[in-house]
Amino acid sequence: ISLKHLEADRLQRKVSGFLPDAHVAFLDEVFKGNSSILNALLTLINERTFHNGIETQKVPLWCIVAASNELPASLELDALYDRFLVRREVQHVSDQAAVSLLKAALGASEKVDQSACPAFTSKSCSELRKLAAEHVQLPGRLLRTIMRLRSYLRDDIQPPVMISDRRLARAVQLLKVAAFTSGFTSVCESDLLMLQHIFWDRQPSDRLLIFDWILDNCMDEAPSGTFNGIPGLLIEGAGRKRLDGIYRRAGQKGGKHTYTQVDGKGVVFYRLFGTSGYWALDDDAMGTGKGDRPWYWYGTRKESSIEPPGGNWFPARDDDGDPVAPYPGPVVWRIHLDEPFGRDNRMLHARLQLSDIAGRFKNGVPVSVECQNLTKSLRKLLRQRTQIYRELHQRLFGCNGFSWLEPCEVTALAERVLPQLKAALVEVEELLEDLQTFDQASI
C-alpha cells in the first residue's frame, strides 16, 4: 500500500515490480488466496485490467502460469479455475531424472545458453495469434469431432465434465495457433490431442479418457465394414440434424421394436396407438413426458414389423395441425450391419446408391448418368481422404514433429489413427473398382 496516498486519504497500491506490472507471471498455490485477491485475479486475467483504488489501469500481462498442490474444492473458485486454459498434472521426479534434480540442487547442472534461444515477446505472441486466425483452417469434420467429445464428457462419464463456452472457444483458437507454429495451414486430426490438456476438470485421470477417446474417434468417417448381419437404419436429411446418423437394432422394449442411434440420443420405435400403431423417431428433447408425439413419424400401421418402413418420414403435428419439427422430414434407409460397424455415413450412402443403381439396371432402367455422378463423388472423397492421410503422416514423420507430445503418444497416434485413415482410403478405392466393373458390365 502506498503510504503517501494513504496520508491523502486514498487507498492505492504500489504496482511497480508486482503482478499488475508484469508481462509474464507465475503464481504459486493460486487457490489459497483470499477472496479479494482472487476477485482481482479474475479481472486481471480476463480483462487485463487492475482496479487500484479509484483508478483502473491496463496491465501488460500476456502469459500467466499457476501451480497448486490441490484442485479447487469450492464452486466459488470455478470462474478462476476456468481461466487457466491448459492444465498439466506434474508427477514426482522419476528415478531416472533424480540425478539431474540433485545436480541442479547442488548448482552443478548444465547452464542454458540463453543467447541461443529466440526472444518471444508479447508483441510476437499477439502477431502469431492474429496470423493463425487468418491463415489456418479448422475443417468442419474436426469441429464435429470436438462437439462429439464435448457431448461424451458431459453425458457419458461420471462425474460429468461441463466445458464452458469460453473454454470451448479458446480451445479451438489454441488448436489453430499450434498448427501455425508447426508450419501448417490447417488443423489436423493429431492436433486434437492437445484437448487432453484442456478439457479435463476436477479429475486429472480424465486426461487419459480424453486421449483414448480422441484416438478412437478422431476419424469422422471410420471404416464401415459390410452390411449382412444386424438390422440397422441410416437416417439422413432430418430438419433436426442431431437425429441423422446410423441406428442399431436394440431389440424389443415393452413389446415395441426399438433402434438406438450410434453416437447420439435418437430412438426409432414402434408406438402403439389404439388397436394399431406407427413408427416414431424421437430423442426425448421435447421433455413433455411419456405418450406425447414424437419429432417424426411414418403413417399408421396395423402390424409392427421388425424393420420400419424406408423412404420419407414426416414431421408430427400438434393439436392445431402445425408441425412440431422442421421440414424436410428425414429419409430412412434400411440397412444391415456387421459387428463391428463404423460411422462412415458417406461410404454407407455410396454403397446404398450402388445397390439402388444395380436394382434399377436389372429392371431395364438406364443408369449411366447415375454411375458417372457416383464415380465423380467417390473420386472427390478419395482426394479428400488422401489429403487427410498425407497431412497426418507429415505431422508424425515430417521435419516439424510434435514437440508438445510425449514419444509414447506419438507412437499411439501412428499405430491407432494412421491405420484407420488407410483403411478408409482402401474402402473408397475398392468401392470405385466395384462401380467401374458394374459400369462396364452395364454398357
Image (tube, grey):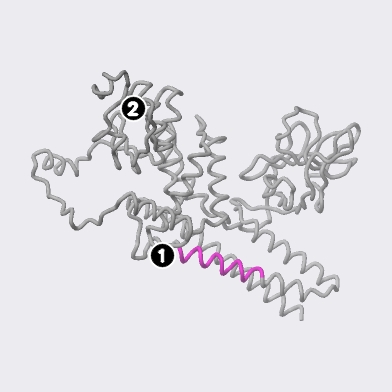
Name the residue type under label 1. Gln
Q: Is residue 213 above or below residue 410?
A: above
The structure residue drawn at horizontal position 69% and vertical position 60%, both measured from the top left corner, is: 349
Image quarter in which the C terminus is found: bottom right
Image position of 249 (left or right of 121): right
Instruction: For marks 2 and 1, give the CA distance.
Output: 39 Å
Badge 1 marks a residue whose secondary structure is helix
Please tell me which residue lies in front, 257 or 100.
100
Residues 356 and 27: in front is 27
Q: Is residue 388 magenta?
A: yes
Please state the horizontal and vertical placement of residue 275, each as a whole percent of the image: 91, 33
* Residue shown at 55% from the left, 62% from the top: 424
Residue 3 is situated, as x and y percent measured from the top left of the image, at 24, 21
Q: Position of residue 97 (x, y in %)?
A: 19, 43
Magenta segment boundaries in residue numbering: 377-391
Camera-near label (2 vs 1) is: 2
Residue 87 inside the magenta-drawn segment = no
Q: Residues within 10 Å of mark 1 (few under 14, many from 20)?
A: few
Quadrant of the image containing the N terminus: top left
Amino acid type, label 2? Glu
Residue 84: x and y, percent?
Answer: 40, 37
Q: Identify the residue shown where x is 29% and y is 26%.
A: 13
Q: Residues within 10 Å of mark 2 (few under 14, many from 20)?
A: few
Instruction: Return the mark for residue 422.
Output: none
Provide the major secondary structure of the magenta segment. helix
Image marks 2 and 1: residues in contact by CB distance under 8 Å:
no
Q: Secondary structure at mark 2?
A: loop
| Location of mark 1 (residue) | 394
In the image, residue 369 above or below residue 277: below
Q: Which residue is disc 2 drawn over?
A: 70
